Amino acid sequence: MAPKLPIYMDNHATTPVDPRVVEAMLPFFTERFGNAASRNHSFGWTAEEAVENARAQIARLINATPKEIIFTSGATESDNLAIKGVAEMYREKGNHIITQATEHKAVLDTCKRLEKYGFEVTYLPVERDGRVNLEDLERAITPKTILITIMYANNEIGVIQPVAEIGKIAQKHGVLFHTDGVQAVGKVPVDVQRDGIHLLSISGHKIYGPKGVGALYVRRKNPRVQVAATIDGGGHERGMRSGTLNVPGIVGLGKACELCQEEMPTESVRMAALRDRLQRAIMGSLDEVYVNGSLDHRLPNNLNISFAYVEGESLLMGINDVAVSSGSACTSATLEPSYVLKALGVGEDLAHTSIRFGLGRFNTEEEVDYVAQRVVETVKRLRELSPLYDLAKEGVDLSKMSWKTD
Amino acid sequence: MAYSDKVIDHYNNPRNVGSMPKDDPKVGTGMVGAPECGDVMRLQIRVNPETQVIEDAKFKTFGCGSAIASSSLATEWVKGRTVEDALHIKNTDIVRELSLPPVKIHCSVLAEDAIKAAIGDWKRKQGADEAQASAATASAKE
Ligand SMILES: Cc1ncc(COP(=O)(O)O)c(C=O)c1O
Ligand code: FES
């Protein structure tokens, strides 16, 4: 059966909202439009009840308690609030923060800004498989360290960090541990108790919920964590995040978490099967293709492959009825290839040839087969066009050639 | 990014893809760019020694769609021109013809460089030939 085109396979960028989530949200735009902070009438109470229900749904998914969930406008804000909020609140204790090279910009650029204000940040390198070295991490801790912020799973390569071990190290040294859980929550089991997490960022639109809503988990016990607000105002969310609550969005985020929790056992198996099918179909038909990042510690829905000798943007152009993304410089505004792949030690030549496939709830086997076939035929065609493929076939070592770069 | 129809056409039906023997004295080869930069173009020309006319051109390109289109167009444009005339092809002409957006201008620059490099290579070979030839007899030309 021919799949319906175009095919969306870029679910690390965003996901479609699940129809069940839309359905749950709709009444909160119209008849249940109340302000959750209105204490004097039923419109307010109805909204507040819906918000508290969502808080509980989110808490259940990550094994937290509802009071530990703070609503935000998305994970960018959650990351900012966690890092800046801890930096301000624990300034007396120290000014050192530890993070790592493959974080999302929401974390890296927040850390960079703090450096301007006198904080010191250690950007740990990662191993070839994309994971941090735990000994490096422990060695980086100083008496001035107040926060470790290391993501749960990476948005480009899907690599899952040794989060529970990081949590233990943080606890041992009395340092707070924040993790950007955007790509992991709802896809793999995340448990703030088991993993020793103090702060966790969540985004709605990566888990089949709406855009513009997210949450920050802030631990209240063992230890009680405090963050200084970055947005001041009416004192909502126990003073940590002011602003009238986005009730429909919050209801959607809650419903999305509930669905992820219910479906994770079957969905994660199905994702892994589709991903493996895609990988087999591609790697079975092409030589010189390389998977970037660990295959053992990886989200079930991620595949990131470099197709040697074929520039990524030209490949995307050839599979224009399939939505995926590339780490190639030609697709980025900065004309720099992916800094994540660079951190793994992937050569820039191969970084330019990388494609990220992000599978999702609504992808089918037929779609996977179609995508694999399109990728294989396009790579073959473009290799016929590639002077590098010619040279490689002649046995020339490309890394030993001198290229005029000016 | 939205591509112009002409870029898409060259990408889907690239003209003059292929290679020529690079040791052939009538062939000039230009290879520009670098794999680390995400773009490498190889453009080759075959020149008629009597008329100085470029009778054939071939290319292979590793790069984005605009880079492929720029080099494909370059092969079309150099064919039938004299070597001196081909040196007048400017990257801005390529930008205009293919409606390249500003971020893709460097792809057209690369194509211009590839033309110049191929012609330079051919000229070097002629120089070497002439040196050899004049060592034996007097050079036929000038
Ligand atoms: C790992 C990671 N962190 C943070 C974000 C930002 O999330 P949001 O779009 O909700 O601000 C994203 C999404 O791009 C992400 O993938
Ligand atoms: S080759 Fe990189 S933008 Fe064209």
Image: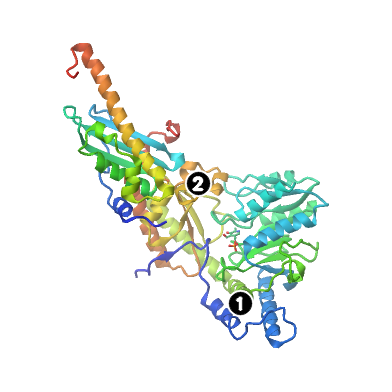
Label 2 or label 1, whichever comes before in sequence order: 1
Across and down, in percent, residue B141 comes to 18, 19
Q: Is residue B97 left or right of residue A220?
A: left
Q: Nearer the viewer, mark 2 or mark 1?
A: 1
Residue for point 50% across, 70% down = A16
Q: Does residue B87 appear in this view?
A: yes
> Answer yes or no: do the residues labelled 2 and 1 have beta carbons within 8 Å?
no
Across and down, in percent, residue A68 comes to 74, 69
Q: Name the residue furthest right.
A: A92
Q: Nearer the viewer, residue B111 or A129?
A: B111
Across and down, in percent, residue A261 comes to 61, 72
Residue for point 60% across, 53% down = A105
Q: Does residue A309 appear in this view?
A: no
Residue carrying label 1: A248
Q: Report the chain holding disc 2.
A: A
Residue A37: image tag: none
Q: Report the chain holding disc 1.
A: A
* Placement of the N terminus of chain A among the 4 image quadrants: bottom left
Residue carrying label 2: A337
Q: Is mark 1 within 8 Å of ligand 1?
A: no
Across and down, in percent, residue B65 comes to 37, 50
Between the residue at mark 2 and the residue at mark 1, the CA separation in whole angstroms equals 38 Å
Q: Counting other residues with Cα less than 10 Å from the Cα at mark 2, is it few (<14), some (14-19), or many (20 or more)?
A: many
**Label 1 residue SS:** helix
